[in-house]
Image (spheres, rainbow, N blue to C red):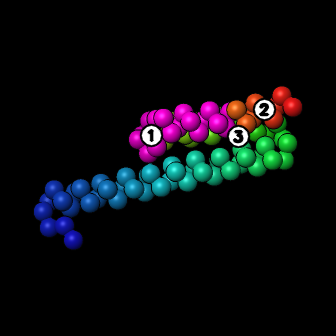
Amino acid sequence: MAIHKSAIKRARQNKKQRERNVSIKSKIKTSVKKVLAAIGSKDSQEAKSTLIKVISHINKGASKGVVCKNTASRKISRLAKKVNLMVQN
């Protein structure tokens, strides 16, 4: 357990940041699964609408430093490509 005042504060901050990070990562994973499920069921309207939400969640995570910016753009690009291919066919 931390003894110094600054170490106690740092432990408190780390706990809050970890909870926030876990929450944001969970939202990202859940929403990505929803998009992939919509793609699998050939529901283009559902895929498009959930893709917009996913992009928002991923960008929020990237801006807060939960996921790397390159990782975020890669995830968005791959999902958008899958949705666009499904919509065209």
In this rendering, which labeled residue sits more in front, label 3 or label 1?
1
**Mark 3 neighbour density, 10 Å: few (under 14) some (14–19) many (20 or more):** some
Disc with the residue nearer the chain's start (2 vs 1): 1
Q: Position of residue 26 (x, y in %)?
A: 55, 54
> Marks 1 and 3: in contact by CB < 8 Å?
no
Horizontal relation, residue 64 to residue 87: left or right: left
- As measured in the structure, the alpha-carbon distance from the residue carrying label 2 to the one carrying label 3 is 16 Å
Mark 1 element type: loop
Residue 50: tell me if it is visible: yes
Q: Which mark is residue 85?
A: 2
> In this rendering, is residue 27 above or below 82?
below
**Dot 1 amino acid type:** Cys
In this rendering, which labeled residue sits more in front, label 2 or label 3?
2
Residue closest to the far bottom: 1
Q: Which residue is mark 1?
A: 68
**Dot 2 amino acid type:** Leu
Q: Which mark is residue 50?
A: 3
Disc with the residue nearer the chain's start (2 vs 3): 3
Q: Position of residue 9 (x, y in %)?
A: 22, 57
Q: Write the residue at 46% across / 35% down.
A: 69
Q: Quadrant of the N terminus?
A: bottom left
> Marks 1 and 2: in contact by CB < 8 Å?
no
Q: Write the residue at 67% across / 38% down.
A: 79
Mark 2 element type: helix
**Dot 3 amino acid type:** Thr
The residue lying toward the viewer, choosing from 39 and 31, is 39
